[in-house]
Amino acid sequence: MKRGNIIANLDWFTILLFILMIFLGWLNIFSAIYNESHPSILDFNQKYGKQFLWILAAIVMAVAILLIDHRFFEFFGYFIYAVAILTLLAVLIVGKEINGSKSWFVMGGFQIQPSEFAKPAVALALAKYLSTFNINIQKARTFVKTAVIIFLPSLLILLQPDTGSALVFFAFVFPVYREGFSGMILITMFTLALLFILVLLFNELLLLLIILVIGFIAYWLLARNFKNLMVAFLIFVGFFIVSYGILFLFGMDSAYYAATLMSLAFSLASYLVMAYIYRIRKIGLLILAVTVVVFYTFAVDYSFEHFLSDYQQRRVNIMLGIQSDPLGAGYNVNQSMIAIGSGGFAGKGFLQGTQTKLDFVPEQSTDFIFCTVGEEWGFIGTFFVILLFLTFFIRLIYLAERQKENFARIYGYGIISVIFIHFFINIAMTIGLFPVVGIPLPFFSYGGSSLWAFTIMLFIFLRLDAGRME
């Protein structure tokens, strides 16, 4: 296929969806921060005027990407990833701290957030690695290298600290699963997330006692053998008594350590019994896995108390219903839900949102742009926006599945997962189902870095799709 045929082979339906989303986003940014003394939407002294410039620059980037040979992105995948890592290191040294995070390069009047551009870089590197000839996706070495590619940028972003952006990189687990990694990856993620919530909701000792009872009942049902059940119970009791005695002699915090040792003893006993019943030889690996899970359980509580600020802790506790703070940490979400609810079925109309006009919702042009949609366009507007995104995702999945090259398919699923996680978490934040972590709504929220990064991700994929017959 000649380069002149690229236009004919582009997926114009996806491009039209992209144009519609950035146009609707621009209108809602204008409405969210409308200033009567600056009524023109092209007033470049206002955010809505600046967003227009970001949109024009994004379109230029999109055209430039479409003019590049599609093989370029696979060939330079690792190089682009290395540049992204270097920029994440550089921002820790020379970046400017804004809102408590050292996440920005500031050049003149422009601010660039390198963590946004790390997402397409990871997608390219991951696709290049997993599409390597003769790679065995089931080997532990492959799993470790894949994890490093995904989570190295995430760790650097955590150092800024920017928890929300770091969280997005977990989205890359989905393309890895699509390429043949065990479904245990998703099960493990779900289990860890559930365990995280349970540790925060319940007293640790009570939670571990419940797990202990359920665990013994479960293994009793599996083994149907009283002898095996007694073996597990005796191992647990013996381990607990000896360990608790040692801790008592040293005068340590008995309640905390007792809970820790109880969970560890129960886990070891249960897995040893299971290994005995089913003649599983890799007991060491099982014990290692359980030890990691136990460590995670107590690391959650420690990390929550020591690594999150008081404000972040309150946000999580409010989301879980542990505490209420409508005038403090919960103010943004509370006002966002009021704004969305006040829109009713058809909304108050364009530029007519009272919550918006009176500035009740902070960050309404960025993280909380969706509540502007809810207030001014009502249920009809929010339903249309969600339907628009779902149509966009379904179309991208269709494009990913029709790819002939593994690289293009893996990259496609990578960017689908990242955009979906942004979409899901952002909307969940605005309606109080997820803590506020500062994640923009793709193509809608104000900001050049996020718009450019999403545009780059999408149009690289569209270029790969257009070149699939070459």
Image (cartoon, rainbow, N blue to C red):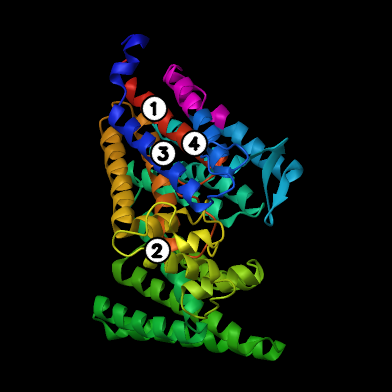
Q: Describe the element under mark 2 as helix, strand or loop.
A: helix
Residue 282 percent location from the top left of the image: 41, 60
Q: Is label 2 or label 1 in front?
A: 2
Residue 340's disc is: 2
**Range shown magenta:** 59-80
In contact (CB < 8 Å): disc 1 and disc 3: no
The residue to which callout 4 is attached is: 120
Residue 23's disc is: 3
- The residue at 30%/45% (across/down) is 388
How far apart are the alpha carbons under marks 2 and 1? 50 Å
Residue 378 percent location from the top left of the image: 33, 59
How far apart are the alpha carbons under marks 3 and 4? 23 Å
Q: Is residue 115 magenta?
A: no
Q: Describe the element under mark 3 as helix, strand or loop.
A: helix
How far apart are the alpha carbons under marks 4 and 1? 22 Å
Q: Is residue 75 magenta?
A: yes
- Would you say residue 465 is visible in this rendering? yes
